[in-house]
Amino acid sequence: MRAIWHPAYIGLGSNVGESRPCIERAILEIDQFEATRVVARSAFYRSAPFGPVAQAPFINAVVGVLTRAEPLDLLRALRALEVQLGRSPPRQRWGPREIDLDLLLHGDARLDTAELTLPHPGIPERDFVLYPLRDIAPPLQIAGLGRVTELAARVPDRGIERLD
């Protein structure tokens, strides 16, 4: 029996080093994951850091993929890619980073484990996730949260800037 292809969405961000090339490389690498293909990508956005740590602005994007990988397997592949791209552990919550790859959604999966929560709990409050997600999946209904276009209209614009 063949595994089913699931749509999934991944948030990408960087504010250390050459952010745009790092995100571009991450997108290319994600497209090379086993049984995963990038099928949509948002524009790049410049956004103010989220949280209490003073730091440079972020460059953010979202990609849509089709994947046969289970959610935790995809998350682990993303974590390994972060290390490959220069992210040094430990991960500082809200801190600066060379690359940050967040699994936002994986089909209709709803998980709440120590390792992964789906849908990502930060989606409804983050302009740097919702604006790029709206670029590639405006009518998407997020389980328990609402439609992407409606969520994006409600989130405060903290000065996010579309770059391309």
Image: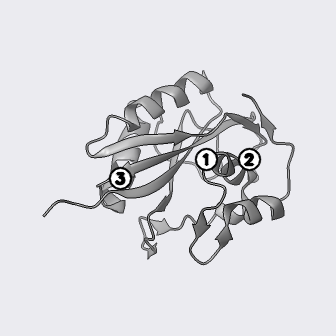
Whole-percent x, y for residue 98 in the image: 55, 32
Q: Determine the residue positioned at 85% across, 49% down.
A: 158
- For disc 3, the marked residue is 74
Lateral position of residue 146 relative to residue 9, left or right: right
Q: Determine the residue positioned at 39% across, 54% down.
A: 75
Q: Nearer the viewer, residue 58 or 36?
A: 36
Q: CA distance from mark 3 to mark 2?
A: 28 Å
- For disc 1, the marked residue is 136
Q: Determine the residue positioned at 61% across, 25% down.
A: 20
The amino acid on which the numbered mark 3 sits, given as a three-letter code, is: Leu
- Closer to the chain start, of discs 1 and 2, is 2
The amino acid on which the numbered mark 2 sits, given as a three-letter code, is: Val
Disc 2 is placed on an element classified as loop
Lateral position of residue 159 relative to residue 143, left or right: right
- Closer to the chain start, of discs 3 and 1, is 3
- Closer to the chain start, of discs 3 and 2, is 2
The amino acid on which the numbered mark 1 sits, given as a three-letter code, is: Ile
- For disc 2, the marked residue is 53
Picture colour scheme:
one colour
Q: Residue furthest front?
A: 139
Q: CA distance from mark 1 to mark 2?
A: 30 Å
Would you say the residues marked 3 and 2 are in contact, meaning their CB atoms lie under 8 Å apart? no
Which quarter of the rendering shows the C terminus? Answer: top right
Whole-percent x, y for residue 137 in the image: 61, 53
Is residue 17 visible to the viewer in this orientation of the structure? no
Disc 1 is placed on an element classified as helix
**Image quadrant of residue 57?**
top right
Q: Nearer the viewer, residue 142 or 82?
A: 142
Disc 3 is placed on an element classified as helix
Q: Is residue 104 above or below residue 47?
A: below
Whole-percent x, y for residue 135 in the image: 67, 45
Which mark identifies residue 30? none
